[in-house]
Amino acid sequence: MKSKVNEIQVSYKEKLEFSLSIKCSADANEIIFNHWDKDTIGLYESFKIMLLNNSNKVKGIYQLSSGGITGTLVDIRILFAIVLKTLSPCIILVHNHPSGKLKPSEVDKQLTEKIVKASKFLDIAVLDHLIITPSGEYFSFADNGIL
């Protein structure tokens, strides 16, 4: 009796006709804030990754998780599966704080450190980690020297 193994198919179609370029954290914040659902940004935490090419042009934004009022679970294996599937050499991590507080928690810092450490093995540049608030304010890990 022959056993059958399913084939895994991976596909991704890139569309960069009018892609926006990231030059600084303010650019990234403007793009991600305009992309965020304003009806939910103040209700619960979500974690997204901004996928970039080598020229820092935005290839896409992927919502990795959404959670509760004070946190969301991020599975690093899924994060890197998305990054690798889209062949993105650079990423920006983003999550919101519904409370409006811009200060990163210890958990935020530990998660960022873990992702940055893993990204080095895969030659993927983590350019920043932004915390955004419902008012449009943001905190940049890179600008504050903690990336």
Image (cartoon, helix red, strand yellow):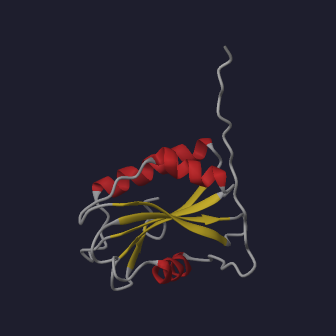
Which image quarter: residue 43? bottom left
* Residue closest to the eye, 27 or 74: 74
Q: Residue drawn at (60%, 41%), measured in percent from left and top?
A: 121
Judge by depth and name the residue closer to the eye, 53 or 15: 15
Q: Quadrant of residue 59?
A: bottom right
Q: Quadrant of residue 57?
A: bottom right
Using the rendered image of the protein, determine whether residue 31 is visible from the camera's viewpoint.
Answer: yes
Q: Going 63% across and 44% down the picture, which residue do you hit?
A: 122
In the displayed structure, would residue 79 be above or below residue 15? above
Residue that sits furthest to the front in the current view:
1
Residue at 62%, 77% (x, y): give it: 23
Q: In the orientation shown, which residue stands out farthest toward the top?
A: 1
In this view, the residue in front, 145 or 10, is 10
Image side of residue 115 versus residue 54, left or right: left
Q: Is residue 42 above or below residue 10?
A: below
Provide residue 89's location: percent of width, then percent of height: 67, 56
